[in-house]
Image: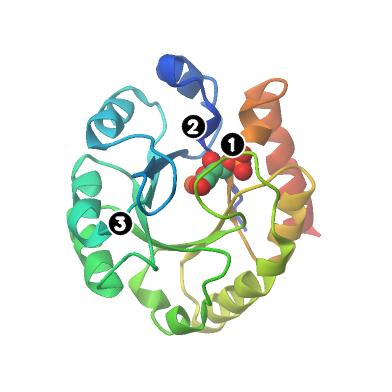
Amino acid sequence: MPVRINPSILSADFVNLEHDIARIATADLVHVDVMDNHFVPNLTFGPQMVGRIQAVSPIPLDVHLMIDDPDRWAPGYAELGAFSVTFHAEAAADAVGLARKLREIGARAGIAVKPGTPIGPYLELLPEFDQVLVMTVEPGFGGQSFIEAVMPKLEALSDVVKRLGLDVWLQVDGGVDERTIAIAAEAGADTFVAGSSVYNTGDPTENIAALRAAAGRHLLG
Ligand SMILES: O=C(CO)[C@@H](O)[C@H](O)COP(=O)(O)O
Ligand SMILES: [Fe+2]
């Protein structure tokens, strides 16, 4: 099973983004956290910034929208050329309709759930999505601790994906490091977002390789 490592540029230097994106060229995708100060108590990038990031990035963008009213705003990020656009289940009025629109534009459609949001209602909708993002911290900030208590949600998702033979990526985001990535992989995740553990210590290329190896060791064993 492939392992995807998507570093989060929330932990990059915002005035040297192009440089910091070049430092993660061995990653699979660049994870771009869009926050609106309403859905979460933090503010990051909007469409103009994401358009510029798209223009300079050597690897495709995995856009994570932590915003109110994604039904209105998410299609614009797909139109910018983002590889995947993930919106929050808690904020969407019509999650399936929005996912269909994103796919129509040409982006992979993702749905995200906060740690306290049950996954049950979304299991039967899985064929409508290309990826599911299970938050392993409360959305809004990098550098928080991985919440292991959400692993049963990944196990439930992984069971349905396998049973129905779906090609839906299962992503975790928040507190992912060399230790916790193995826990998430064991629970069924295949796509891993990591901010602090890629950018905040040592060399990003080595950190990405170490994360890939730690997840892969589990998946092989
Ligand atoms: O969506 C978010 C935070 O809300 C993430 O993508 C963070 O950027 C992950 O950062 P670390 O927990 O890996 O430092
Ligand atoms: Fe994120």
Instruction: Depth check: give the residue in front, 72 or 2.
Output: 72
Counting residues from the N terminus, which is met first, the one under dot 1 or under dot 2? Answer: 2
Instruction: Depth check: give the residue in front, 32 or 62.
Output: 32
Distance from Cα at disc 3 to Cα at disc 1: 23 Å
Counting residues from the N terminus, which is met first, the one under dot 3 or under dot 1? Answer: 3
The residue tagged with tag 2: helix, strand or loop? helix
Counting residues from the N terminus, which is met first, the one under dot 2 or under dot 3? Answer: 2
**Front label number (2 vs 3):** 3
Q: Is mark 1 within 8 Å of ligand 1?
A: yes
Residue indicated by mark 1: 195
Residue 65 in view, yes or no: yes
- Dot 1 and dot 2 residues touching (CB under 8 Å): yes
The residue tagged with tag 3: helix, strand or loop? loop
Is 29 located above or below residue 25 in the figure? below
Is 9 located above or below residue 34 in the figure? above
Residue 6 in view, yes or no: no
Horizontal side of 53 relative to 211 (left or right) equals left
Quadrant (top left/top right/bottom left/bottom right) for the C terminus: bottom right
The residue tagged with tag 1: helix, strand or loop? loop
Residue 145 place in picture, x, y as percent: 70, 48
- Dot 2 and dot 3 residues touching (CB under 8 Å): no
Could you say which disc has been placed on residue 9 in the image?
2
Amino acid type shown at disc 3: Asp
**Front label number (3 vs 1):** 3
Is 128 located above or below residue 183 in the figure? below
Could you say which disc has been placed on residue 68 in the image?
3
Horizontal side of 91 relative to 141 (left or right) equals left
Q: Residue at x 46, y 66 (%)?
A: 168
Residue 4 place in picture, x, y as percent: 56, 47
Residue 160 place in picture, x, y as percent: 54, 81
Amino acid type shown at disc 1: Gly
